[in-house]
Image (tube, rainbow, N blue to C red):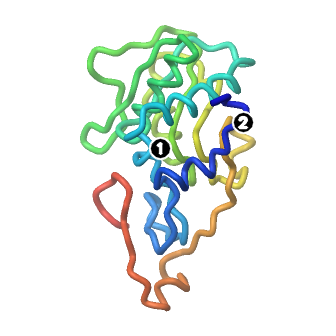
C-alpha cells in the first residue's frame, strides 16, 4: 500500500488502536477516547506503513539520530529510524527518571528527533528532552503517530504527526463519564493512577 494513501485513523480503528469508553490517561486526566498504539505493534506491516509515512514527512529535517521513550515508542521509533536510515536509541526510566542507559551516548551537537507514539500532555517528550540535554545534542524535531496536544506546545517545538486529534479531556473531579458511573479503564503503561 502506498503510504500517501494511508488513512491513519482507519488503520487505528481496524487494528484496535483507537478505543472508545472511559479512560484515565498517563496525565491522570480522563477521556472518552484512547489511542493504544501498542495494539498496532502486533502487525509489523502496519508499523512499517506508518513509519514509512512519518519518515517521509521528516525528510525535510536534517537529523542524525532518533530517540524514543520506553516502552511504548521503542518499536515505532526503531522502525522510523530504519525507514529513514538513521541511528536509533531509546531512553527508559531508572528510579522514575528518564535516562539514556545501556551504554548509549550522544555526541555534542548531534541532531536528534524524538519519536513518540501518542502525545497528549507532552510530559514524556519533556522528560526525554531532559534526559538528553547533558550530552549537548540538539533536539531538532518531534514526531509521532497521534498528536493530541491541540497545538499547546507549538512555541516550544513543532510536532510532525500522522494524525492530529483534538482531545476530549476532563479533570477527574468534573468528569461527566465518572458522574455516569461508566467504568474507568487504565490502558496505558504507567503504574499508578494519579
Say which quadrant the C terminus sits in.
bottom left
Residue that sits furthest to the bottom in the current view: 180
**Compared to 156, does 119 lie above or below?**
below
Say few, some or many: other residues with alpha carbon within 10 Å of mark 2 (under 14 / 14 to 19 / 20 or more): few
Q: Position of residue 79 (x, y in %)?
A: 48, 24
Q: Tell me which residue sits at (72%, 31%) in the image.
A: 4
Q: Position of residue 158 (x, y in %)?
A: 71, 36
**Picture layout, residue 171 above or below residue 149:** below
Left or right of 72, for residue 174: right
Number of numbered discs present? 2
Residue highlighted by disc 2: 5
**Label 1: element kind:** helix
Q: Residue at x 37, y 60 (%)?
A: 187
Q: Is residue 114 left or right of residue 165?
A: left
Front position among marks 1 and 2: 2
Q: CA distance from mark 1 to mark 2?
A: 30 Å
Residue 153, numbered circle: none
Which residue matches tag 1?
A: 124
Q: Nearer the viewer, residue 40 or 107?
A: 40
Asked if labels 2 and 1 touch by Cβ distance under 8 angstroms, the answer is no
Q: Could you tell me residue 108's position as x and y percent?
A: 52, 9
Amino acid at each position: 500500500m502506498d503510504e500517501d494513501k494511508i488513512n491513519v485513523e482507519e488503520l487505528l480503528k481496524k487494528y484496535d488502536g483507537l478505543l472508545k469508553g472511559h479512560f484515565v490517561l498517563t496525565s491522570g486526566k480522563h477521556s472518552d477516547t484512547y489511542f493504544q498504539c501498542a495494539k498496532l505493534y502486533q502487525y509489523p506491516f502496519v508499523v512499517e506503513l506508518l513509519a514509512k509515512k512519518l519518515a517521509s514527512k521528516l525528510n525535510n529535517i536534517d537529523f542524525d539520530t532518533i530517540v524514543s521513550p520506553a516502552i511504548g515508542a521503542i518499536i515505532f521509533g526503531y522502525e522510523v529510524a530504519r525507514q529513514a536510515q538513521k541511528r536509533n536509541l531509546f531512553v527508559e526510566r531508572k528510579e522514575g527518571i528518564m535516562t539514556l542507559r545501556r551504554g548509549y551516548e550522544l555526541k555534542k551537537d548531534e541532531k536528534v528527533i524524538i519519536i513518540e507514539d501518542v502525545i497528549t500532555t507532552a510530559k514524556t517528550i519533556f522528560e526525554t528532552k531532559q534526559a538528553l540535554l547533558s550530552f549537548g545534542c540538539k533536539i531538532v524535531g518531534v514526531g509521532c503517530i497521534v498528536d493530541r496536544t491541540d497545538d499547546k506546545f507549538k512555541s516550544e517545538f513543532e510536532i510532525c504527526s500522522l494524525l492530529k486529534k483534538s482531545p476530549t479531556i476532563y479533570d477527574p473531579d468534573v468528569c461527566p463519564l465518572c458522574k455516569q458511573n461508566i467504568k474507568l479503564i487504565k490502558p496505558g503503561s504507567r503504574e499508578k493512577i494519579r
